[in-house]
Image: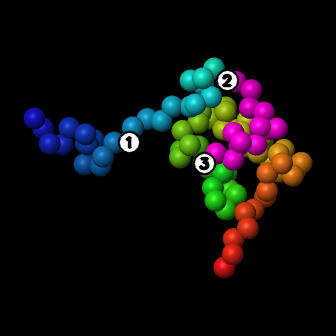
Amino acid sequence: MNRYADKNKRGFKTRKKRICRFCSDKEYYIDFKDDKKLVRFLTEQGKIIPRRTSGNCAKHQRELATAIKRARHLALIPYVADIAR
């Protein structure tokens, strides 16, 4: 058994490919009024989670970003979170 079986040629561990949850569920419409779904793609500070972290495909990441921005404009979700320092 090769102990480097889970590593690539340079010795780095390979990361498991994340799948787009919108493609896998066949749920193509991302609704800006569904704030519960949109909040899952925001950090604690209110930033949009990038595509490489969330695992979304490019098409759905663009739709998601547009839906988050529309929801922010209508004050359904906040632009920034309240951070007490």
User: For the view shown, which residue lies furthest in the left direction?
Assistant: 1
Give the position of the N terminus as an image quadrant.
top left
Magenta-drawn segment:
27-41
User: For the view shown, which residue lies furthest in the bottom direction?
Assistant: 85
Numbered label attached to residue 27: 2
Left or right, residue 9 beside residue 16: left
Left or right, residue 24 beside residue 84: left
Secondary structure mostly taken by the magenta-highlighted segment of the chain: loop
Nearer the observer, 47 or 4: 47
User: Magenta span has 31?
Assistant: yes
In this rendering, the label closer to the viewer, 2 or 3: 2
- The residue to which callout 1 is attached is 15
Crowding around mark 2 (Cα neighbors within 10 Å: few <14, some 14 to 19, many 20+) is few
Is residue 20 shown above or below 51? above
Nearer the observer, 26 or 10: 26
**Image coordinates for residue 39, horizontal then vertical, percent:** 69, 47
Crowding around mark 1 (Cα neighbors within 10 Å: few <14, some 14 to 19, many 20+) is few
Mark 2 residue type: Glu
Mark 3 residue type: Pro
Callout 1: SS? loop
**Image coordinates for residue 30, horizontal then vertical, percent:** 74, 32
Asked if the residues shown at circle 1 and circle 2 are in contact, with their CB atoms under 8 angstroms apart, the answer is: no
Residue drawn at 58 percent across, 31 percent down:
21
Is residue 67 shown above or below 79? above
- The residue to which callout 3 is attached is 50
